[in-house]
Image (cartoon, rainbow, N blue to C red):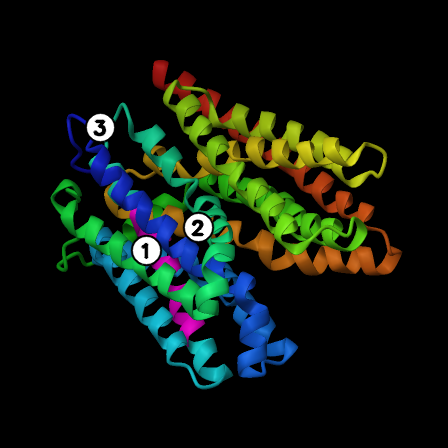
Amino acid sequence: MNASHPETDWRAVLAAAFCGVAVAMSVGKVPIAMEQLRGEFGLSLVAAGWISSMVNLIGVSTALLFGLFGDRVGALRMCFVGLVVSVLGGLGALLASGEWTLLLSRFAEGAGMVSVAVSAPALLSAASSPHDRRFALGIWSGYLPAGVGIVMLLAPLVMPFGGWRGLWLLTLGMLLLATAALWRSRPAYRIAAPSGRDPHPLAAAREALAQPEPWLLAAAMTSWTLQHYALIIWLPTFLREQRDLAAPLVALLSCLMVLANVPGNLIGGMLLQRHFHRGNLIVGANVVTALCGLGIFTDVLPDLVRYGLCLLLSFTGGLVPASVLSSSASYARTARQIGTLQGLYMQFGNIGPFIGPPLIAMLVAASGRWEDAMYVTGSAALCGIGLGLLIRKREMKAAGATRA
């Protein structure tokens, strides 16, 4: 697929993963600072909504195109461009004088994140030995909850002194550190550059997308993000409005729930490296998350048990992105297809946060009961189980054909 090291260069793997964490921090800071932004810039609810959802909008509409473009220009170049654009977006916000400038800076940050998200996995793959590649991509799959969780933890320490600008400076510093780490590790990312003389630049992408398995895996990603974002929406609201907990405690409990997803991703990578079938992992994860959702959204169990189920849902669900995002190492026949597949997975993964909140809001508004959110999580989990079974069937068939 691509030139790879006989031994994994873990420093280069972690440098590429750090790029994902840095852009995730950059993106995750906005909801935390939205109250201050609205107060300073006089943002309307509509403008605040666009600023908050800009990244998801870019992801759900253009991630595949970003992946195609990244495969064309080269993963290392695309990743550097994404980091630079993210830095420029953050600087633009610091210099913003109104909502339109702020919206433009957010657009740049979103474009930068998508650029890094579709290109960095190819860099991890190139720096990994074939034996370690699945685990390395499992590390990558935790970049988003890790970045968002870290910025949620650090925001209460930074914002009392520097306000939202202090938070922006923190994330800019992380982006610059990630850029330096990537630059230092660039000799490890030995990916054959695409030839500008290739008369059919989309041929490799068409070959990758002609396989049914990536589409099934992408749909499984949607089923997981629907469940996760239902929880992300419900938990802070429940703790604040129905249990009257203080804002710092609500933020901490919500942050821990998000971070619980990270070890799930790492364990998923370890299981994949031990040759567990990703279809089995997707089925098992969705069975557990379905049961957790049932316990969380039915007001029967004690609050402590329900919160424990939130942690378990987030932790176990980490097996799904680990299974999906690492599959590019299996289904990309050349290095030029990795970005295309990662763009596909990201585009489908963003469907969850894009349609999940309004779908849940409509159900809850119609009945007045948060418990109805379990219809969203339950249906998504059942779809995930069905998709996992299909993926397992196709994997077993392919394995049998290979042995034959």
Give the residue type at disc 3.
Answer: Ser
Q: What residue is shown at x 69% (from left), y 47% (from top)?
A: 235
The numbered mark at residue 344 is 2
Residue that numbered label 1 is attached to: 174
Give the residue type at disc 2.
Answer: Leu
Q: Residue furthest right?
A: 367
Main SS of residues in magenta? helix
Q: What residue is shown at x 34% (from left), y 45% (from top)?
A: 207
Q: Mark 1 vs mark 2: which is more N-terminal?
A: 1
Give the residue type at disc 1.
Answer: Met
Cα separation between marks 3 and 2? 25 Å
Q: In the rendered image of this protein, does residue 106 appear above or below residue 241?
A: below
Q: Which residues are magenta?
A: 105-120
Residue that numbered label 3 is attached to: 129
Q: Which part of the image, by quadrant, shows the C terminus? A: top left
* Nearer to us: label 3 or label 2: 3
238 relative position to 267: left or right: right
Residue 58 position within the rendered picture, expressed as x and y whole percent measured from the top left: 47, 64
The answer to whether any part of residue 1 appears in the image is no
Cα separation between marks 1 and 3? 28 Å
Residue 393 position within the rendered picture, expressed as x and y whole percent measured from the top left: 53, 24
